[in-house]
Amino acid sequence: MSDEDAFSQAVSAICGRDQRYDADAYFFLKEGMAKAVEQVAKAEGKQRHLTGQELSLGLRDHALGEFGPMAMTVMASWGITKTEDFGNMVYSLIDAGVFTKTGADSHQDFADVFDFTETFVLPYLPESLKPALRKKEKKP
């Protein structure tokens, strides 16, 4: 069985027992991880394991590159609304034996790495709407 087939089967099994995230989200994550690993390798001259923060930021860049102003809409349609969702998906793939982790890795590494509205919505709004949205977000 190819790695791609194994990944597809793992995603099908995960989605069968946990419907929080669309299967496409897992394929997006895999593609974004590959790009993030490539970027780190290019910058550092060697390939290495990514931290949760690095992966989250790589997925942010991948989403912006692939979907631009529609990134928040696409990600939300897959069930992804915060960086913790990346961690949930990664740990599901670890539990399925598809991804690996080191002893230093933690699910907490994905907590609040960046704010989705600040990243995926505000840059595309007219300046006149940004203050109103920021005030709205801060209300409890």
Image (tube, rainbow, N blue to C red):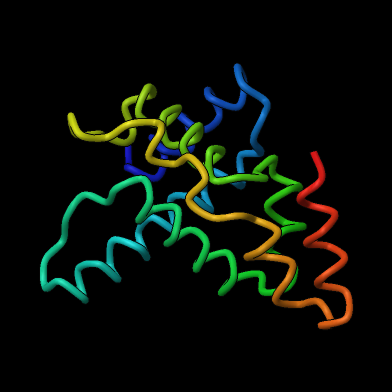
Q: At 68% from the left edge and 52% from the top edge, which residue is drawn?
A: 75
Residue furthest top in the image: 17
| Image spot of residue 7 (x, y percent) | 42, 38
Q: Which quadrant of the structure image shows residue 5?
A: top left
Looking at the picture, how far across and down is residue 16, in whole percent?
Answer: 62, 21
Q: Quadrant of residue 124?
A: bottom right
Image height of 108 relative to 34, above or below: above
Residue at 31% across, 26% down:
97
Outermost residue, bottom side: 127
Eyeballing the image, is 126 above or below 61?
Answer: below
Name the quadrant of the N terminus. top left
x%, y% of residue 34? 35, 59
Quadrant placement of the C terminus: top right
For the point 25% across and 67% down, the residue is 40
Q: How many marks?
A: 0
Horizontal relation, residue 46 to residue 123: left or right: left
User: Residue at left 45%, top 27%?
Assistant: 92
Query: In this rendering, would 132 be left or right of 96?
Result: right
The answer to which image quadrant residue 63 occupies is bottom right
In the rendered image, the vertical position of residue 11 relative to residue 121, given as above or below: above
Residue 38 left/right relative to 47: right
Instruction: Give the side of residue 39 with respect to residue 33, left or right.
Output: left
